[in-house]
Image (spheres, rainbow, N blue to C red):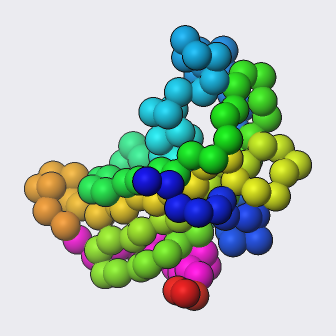
Amino acid sequence: MSKASPSSKSDYRYFVPITTRWKDNDIYGHVNNVTYYAYFDTIANQYLIEKGGLNIHSDPTVGFVVNSGCNYYAPIAFPDRLEGGLKVNRLGNSSVEYGIAIFKDGEEQAVADGHFVHVFVDKASNKSVPIPGNIKQALEALLVESN
């Protein structure tokens, strides 16, 4: 069940433009719900690469998504221009819960918002490890006060 009201841009700390694609539309003429999760993943990983210095090809540590959820408020469709907002809801030793939202370009209320949890693991062993220092520092910059 969706929460009562969408989040607003002021709730988020980092933004990235998102270009919808023709193939994002489903048979009903709007962006399919599963596509939002691809947007979420892109937003978080772009931040980790740009601000946390994550090298997806050679770093020994990777983040695995272990939990996610999304609330939908308004439909979007190609060729809408969007912005993704990112914040950190909780930051632990080896995991992070992101808060993520999708906004139509220029609008203050989210068309969808949600969360997902990354657990950082060693690529070779698939065992959880502490979040690397450079990434943890970048995530701390997005940490919001819990309500």
* Residue 136 on image: x %, y %: 46, 76
- In the shown orientation, is residue 123 left or right of residue 132? left
Instruction: Please identify the residue farthest to the right as the structure is shown.
Output: 106
* Residue 92 on image: x %, y %: 35, 81
Of residues 102 and 19, the one nearer the viewer is 102
Task: Give the quarter of the image for residue 57.
Answer: top left
* Vertical position of residue 36 compared to residue 120: above or below: above
Tell whether position 126 is magenta.
no
- In the shown orientation, is residue 64 left or right of residue 71? left
Look at 63% across and 47% down and name the residue there. 73
* Residue 48 visible from this viewpoint: no
* Residue 29 on image: x %, y %: 64, 16
* Vertical position of residue 63 compared to residue 29: above or below: below
Task: Give the quarter of the image for residue 18.
Answer: top right
* Vertical position of residue 87 compared to residue 137: above or below: above
Q: Which residues are magenta?
A: 129-144
Of residues 32 and 44, the one nearer the viewer is 32
* Vertical position of residue 88 compared to residue 121: above or below: below
* Residue 53 on image: x %, y %: 53, 61
Of residues 106 and 45, the one nearer the viewer is 106
Of residues 125 and 92, the one nearer the viewer is 92
* Residue 95 visible from this viewpoint: yes
Look at 50% across and 55% down and name the residue there. 2
Instruction: Please identify the residue farthest to the top as the structure is shown.
Output: 27
Look at 31% across and 81% down and name the residue there. 93
